Image: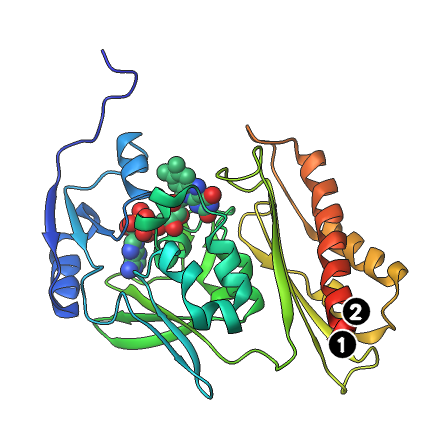
Amino acid sequence: MLARPGLPDFEYIRAETPQDVFRLLGEKGDKIKLLMGGTDLFIQMRDRSEGAEILLDVKYLPGMQEINFNKKKGLTVGAAVTLNQLSIHPDVKTHYGILSQSADTVGNYQLRNRATLGGNLCNASPSADLAPAALVYEGTVCLTGPDGNRELGVDEFMIGPGKTALKAGEFLTGLHFSIPPPDAVGQYLKLGRSKKGDLAIVGVAVLGYSDSEVPSGFRFRIGLNSTAPTPYRVPQAEELLAQNQITEEILNQAADEAMKVSAPIEDVRATALYQKKMVRNLTFKSLKEVWDLLKKS
Ligand SMILES: Cc1cc2nc3c(=O)[nH]c(=O)nc-3n(C[C@H](O)[C@H](O)[C@H](O)COP(=O)(O)OP(=O)(O)OC[C@H]3O[C@@H](n4cnc5c(N)ncnc54)[C@H](O)[C@@H]3O)c2cc1C
């Protein structure tokens, strides 16, 4: 007998138009799961945590695999763009480096050929590696459904482990990011059990840029994953850094704030206490490195 029973039977349907998706979701409801790369969904079906009679493949719908960049309007990424496409795209690398960098930390090369940006967010795992970057670039998700299109902030989209703000009949078509501030620099630091290829124990994205409107002259955005039910920003720390002259002491205080608001649970990867301490360490390290880059630019 196999250690795991394998995948259950299912019917595969390739959606040709959004209307196919609305109609089938309306007719079959819970019996359907939407499919893109399948790297989360197939694991969940194999382990029986998700069941579906029909897998409706939405990745061939128009625009789902496109990346478009415009110097005024910003970046639009189709939901089914793979993580390898995202990590090597020249405009993404140049203007949204943290997205490209985070995509490159996921699993391995073969997995990233299937795994998509949209799937990473729709799966709504607390450890989703693309979420911190999507949060610090203040992305919006583009949703479509039988009642029309709507946009939501990434911060409003993931509402709990495995839960999103998608309404019945809706699906994700893409993400939009406006142009970051001109001198913005940033990075994603990820701690896993191995150097590459593991889920995050803690992941921290930091974006820093100058802003003459605030007392410190600089703003920092901090996005974290894996240490709360959903990926999150740390406004308390961000405000501290905007209101006070940037010194090592202030960077330390900001890292303390990040640790205070983190709420990790014990899991196979780490104890809650270890994760909290690593939130502090990684946030400080990342803030310091981004600050050093900002001072040079
Ligand atoms: C070996 C391995 C290693 C991994 N390592 C990492 C890692 O390091 N970091 C990380 O973050 N993740 C990791 N993952 C998880 C996974 O690869 C990513 O979350 C990936 O981005 C999911 O994308 P996908 O296209 O495969 O999603 P799918 O599995 O196709 O879909 C994910 C979920 O979203 C739903 N969905 C799909 N498309 C849509 C849509 N358009 N609208 C609404 N809902 C939709 C599906 O029904 C499903 O519930 C790993 C997975 C494996 C198997």
On screen, residue 294 versus residue 4, left or right, reads right
Residue at the top extreme, as displayed: 1
Under mark 2, the amino acid is: Leu
Where is the N terminus found, in terms of image quarters?
top left
Query: Residue 94: x and y, percent?
Result: 51, 71
Q: Is residue 269 above or below residue 228?
A: above
Cβ(mark 2) to ligand 1 < 8 Å? no
Q: Position of residue 227 (x, y in %)?
A: 61, 45
Residue at disc 1, secondary structure: strand
Circle 2: element type: helix
- Tell me what residue is drawn at x 47 percent, y 52 percent: 104
Q: Are marks 2 and 1 in contact (CB under 8 Å)?
A: yes
Q: Nearer the viewer, residue 47 or 69?
A: 69
The circle on residue 218 is 1
Could you tell which of marks 2 and 1 lies nearer the N-terminus?
Answer: 1
Between 224 and 25, the one lying in front of the other is 224
Residue 161 seen: no
- Which residue does the image show at 13% across and 68% down from the upper left? 17
Q: Tell me residue 155's x, y (percent).
A: 52, 64
> Residue 90 shows which numbered tag?
none
Question: Which label number is shown at residue 241?
Answer: 2
Indicate the quadrant where residue 27 lies.
Answer: bottom left
| Residue 62 visible in the current orientation | yes
Q: Residue at x 85, y 69 (%)?
A: 246
Image x and y of residue 28, in percent: 13, 52
> Which residue is at 38% across, 55% downward?
84
